[in-house]
């Protein structure tokens, strides 16, 4: 009985060390005037580590983001559309910043997703 109780205590201690793994990405939206109209470019940065869950699934091409998922190829040209999609996939915006460098304005959103 003592050994069984000891086993439960040890098992409980190991399970308390199990941690959630957090993953991050950044959505950047660059604002500009194009042909007299307000326009923007959307980019997703997942870093260079190949172990990211979106590695090989995200393409930044011609001012839009392409994501390959179970439903096929999805294209996003709007920051709101990509943020809504990522929110549906379990990502949460944890920080946003507006920046301006010279004449270029952009907003960056830092997103986090917890994996168990």
Image: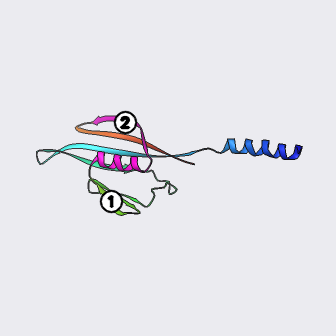
Q: Measured from the top left, where is residue 87 in percent x and y?
A: 39, 46
User: Residue sitting at 68 percent across and 41 percent down?
Assistant: 16
Residue 70 shown left or right of residue 103 in the figure:
right
The outermost residue toward the left is 36
Nearer to the camera, 26 or 114: 114
Whole-angstrom CA distance, mark 2 to mark 1, is: 24 Å
The outermost residue toward the bottom is 72
Classify mark 1: residues with Cα within 10 Å, few (<14), some (14-19) or many (20+): some
Q: Is residue 90 magenta?
A: yes
The image quadrant that residue 12 belongs to is top right
Q: Measured from the top left, where is residue 17 in percent x and y?
A: 68, 42
Give the residues drawn in magenta, as a range: 78-100
| Residue ID for mark 2 | 96
User: Residue sitting at 89 percent across and 43 percent down?
Assistant: 2
User: Residue sitting at 25 percent across and 36 percent down?
Assistant: 102
Nearer to the camera, 9 or 68: 9
Q: Earlier in the sequence, mark 2 or mark 1?
A: 1
Classify mark 2: residues with Cα within 10 Å, few (<14), some (14-19) or many (20+): some
Residue 69 higher or lower than 8, as above or below:
below
Q: Is residue 109 magenta?
A: no
Residue 73 higher or lower than 99, as above or below:
below
Total labels drawn: 2
User: Residue sitting at 48 percent across and 55 percent down?
Assistant: 53
Q: Secondary structure at mark 1?
A: strand
Q: Are marks 2 and 1 in contact (CB under 8 Å)?
A: no
The image quadrant that residue 18 belongs to is top right
| Residue ID for mark 1 | 74
């Amino acid at each position: 009985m003592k050994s069984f109780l000891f086993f439960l205590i040890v098992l409980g201690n190991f399970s308390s060390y199990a941690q959630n793994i957090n993953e991050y990405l950044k959505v950047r939206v660059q604002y500009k005037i194009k042909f007299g109209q307000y326009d923007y470019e959307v980019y997703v940065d997942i870093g260079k580590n190949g172990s990211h869950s979106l590695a090989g699934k995200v393409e930044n091409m011609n001012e839009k983001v392409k994501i390959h998922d179970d439903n096929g190829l999805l294209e996003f040209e709007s920051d709101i559309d990509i943020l809504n999609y990522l929110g549906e996939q379990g990502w949460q915006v944890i920080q946003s910043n507006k920046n301006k460098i010279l004449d270029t304005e952009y907003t960056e959103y830092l997103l986090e997703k917890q994996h168990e």
